[in-house]
Amino acid sequence: MKKSIQDIGELKKLAIKKTFETFSSGEDGLAASSLQERYNKYGYNELEEKSVNPILKFLSYFWGPIPWMIEVAAILSAVISHWEDFWIIFVLLLLNATVGFWQEYKAGDAIQQLKKKLALNARVKRAGKWSSIPARELVPGDVVRVRLGDVVPADLKLFTGDYLSTDESALTGESLPVEKHTKDLAFSGSVVRQGEMDGLVVATGSETFFGRTAKLVEEAKTVSHFQRAVVKIGHYLIVMAAFMIALIFLVSFFRNESFLDTLQFALVLTIAAIPVALPAVLSVTMAVGASALAKKKAIVSKLVAIEEMAGMDILCSDKTGTITKNELTLDDVLSQENYSNDDVLVFASLASREEDNDPIDTAIINKTNSLDAPREKLKDFSASGFKPFDPVIKRSEASVVSGQETFSVSKGAPQVILSLLPKEEQEKIGKTVNIQVDELAQKGYRTLGIARTNKNENWEFVGLIPMFDPPREDSAETIKTASAMGVNVKMITGDHTSIAKQIAQKVNLKSRISEATIFLKKNEREAARIVEKADGFSQVFPEHKYRIVELLQDRKHIVGMTGDGVNDAPALKKADVGIAVAGATDAAKSAADIVLTLPGLSVIIDAIKESRKIFQRMNSYAIYRIAETIRVLLFITLAILVFNFYPVTAIMIVLLALFNDAPIMAIAYDNVRYSPIPERWNMRVLLSMATFLGLIGVVSSFTIFYIGQSVLKLPADQVQTFIFLKLAIAGHLTIFVTRTRGPFWSIKPSPVMFWSAVSTKILATFVAVYGWFITPISWKLAALVWGYAIVAFLITDFLKIRMYKVLDHNDISFSKFHKSAQPAQIN
């Protein structure tokens, strides 16, 4: 039966036994035979997403400022009986809609595929056996275990375990955690902050408290440095177009020209000037980048993270599992007086739980089971209660029964375990234990302290277990590569300072490792300075990570942060690029921008390289688009104002937009070299170069105008076709100029990029020669235009290289940036 909100309210009061009866289940979970029936009855455990009708989605591309302008131009063409113009403009409108719809569909499909890889899993007990399944496959009646770091997968009636502390802020807006006990309900979507319990699934999907009462609001999109620059470029082009078109209107008014003809021409000119393809180029480039990273085992959950990563200059990296293997090796244990080495392993095993798959617990249990004496001794004890490891108090605890004796055991950080002891006992052995911990740390060992309670219920220190987590084989080389790319890696760890320094020396990190407490009591400026200069921090708590990110951002750095635990989530969300490492908790994955499915840092380096390639492509497109707008708009405006001659017709402008904008999306697949330093938008250099190339294009266009009109003495309509073909051929050649800082041949274009440009130039030639919609010209004139455009291209490329040298020399901030590798920002 499906439960309503009122039923869920009643379930809070319902006894556990009665709840099991209501859902025809038991503590061993459901039988496999009953699952299909429940899927048919309840459906899958997921919230139905509103799907937009594809036809309505396609029609939406005909609605908006840019489509309106194209539609008005088409209507005006029909009013003045320019039917050829009407049909060409109509085709342009249809093409824009089709390309936009298709590209968004492909990008959306790619993102959906990536999201499937991020789907949450749940630990479920069916027919008495525990297994991990996708959370969407849960049904009411399933028995589920939730623990620290899990996102609660469905509404649960808790029935086994001491307690849970859950973060329900996503449901209620209340930031304080809520404590849950047996008979309480844990709600779908809440995050487990502490504890571990089993629960019975009482509601799934849209029938959960979350699904029935909370409206899913799309996350507000973060506007990155990258997007802000693109918006600025769009505004720049629109303002330029508006100014020049206003001039054309003024002149046509004084010359008593047809208002409708001028209006139609102005609208079409606006279409050519406005970056219609810009949103599509951006989304396709991002989607291509995300797909490339997915193949390298980095799943992008927020596309803007790719953009931010191009400018990331500091990476705060977890040590365990990222820089190191997270494969703990136990060394010889150190026992205290009255306890043997076997006792240390036995009590440590009792304070561990195999089914939690905790790496420390697994290492201890495997070590104990591999030795005959401890394995036999362990059989004399049984655990009657268990409190899993809590990162806040840094220890786990278990209640143990041995015959008639009941006592508690605990394992955790040595200083935490020592603090459990009576004061006189702390004074007696504390110094010795601390010396042992320091000596082991100097060798790179991490230590666990073990304690148990005696008959008087006082804690006694049992011994220490040294553990070593060796660095990954690729960590040293990866960190070296990151440094060479201008990314400063800072190691963040909860371990002892000595251990952190030992690992740092082995992986090419400097050894300026400080305890996190060093900057806590400093003023804002001093704290930021300390954090910026440090190579890493030890004995870090979750709140320290957040503060480290915040202080670095205050110093204008673009900060990446890796993490895996629930308590890393705030820092991951705060960072410009939050990275959940392999094996991260569901909470960390939800907060991160990028989720790694392979251990280690090398995947992050791949992500940095890919993001910088994307930046290069977008930078090339930005320069190309501004240069083309200046070239076409300024040339046409000056020709009209100075020579009272329309160098191209409205239909030619529409064709130019088709030939230049439609294939430009191939830039998303272009071959580029990633920058050796973090990227930034240097608007001064970008606009200067684009304007320079645009002005060269204007001079080049007026030269061929002179050749056609004064040298070849062509009729006016053939001069227009002559100029049209030059603008079409030279237009796409411009992208080969802007895509490199050096000579155009220094980086080979991708086949997709090259052939998309060549094919449109050939098509434009056929249009000009065979007179499709325009006045035809001869093959001889077409060949002359090709030769002229290629020579102009070679001269422009030569001048571009010289111009970059002038700009780089004069741009002091640019030079400083190259020396210090400062973060990406818009000037």
Image (spheres, grey):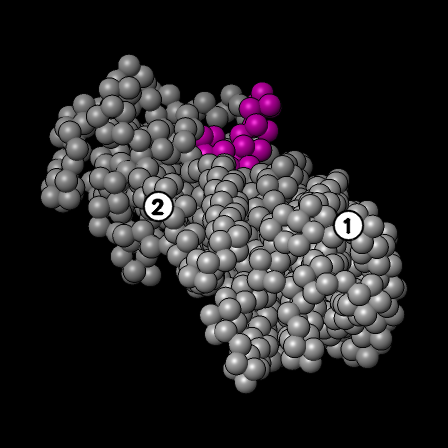
* 447 lies left or right of 704: left
Q: Earlier in the sequence, mark 2 or mark 1?
A: 2
Q: Identify the amino acid type marked 1.
A: Ser
Which residue is the site of mark 1? Answer: 778
Q: Position of residue 369 (x, y in %)?
A: 55, 24
Disc ID at residue 324 = none
- Label 1 element class: loop
Magenta segment: 351-373
Q: Identify the amino acid type marked 2.
A: Leu
User: At 57% across and 62% down in the image, what residue appears?
Assistant: 650
Residue 704 against residue 777 in the figure, above or below: below
Q: Is residue 66 magenta?
A: no
In this view, the residue in front, 512 or 43, is 43
In this view, the residue in front, 697 or 586, is 697
Specify the quadrant that holds the N terminus: top left
User: At 58% across and 20% down in the image, what residue appears?
Assistant: 372
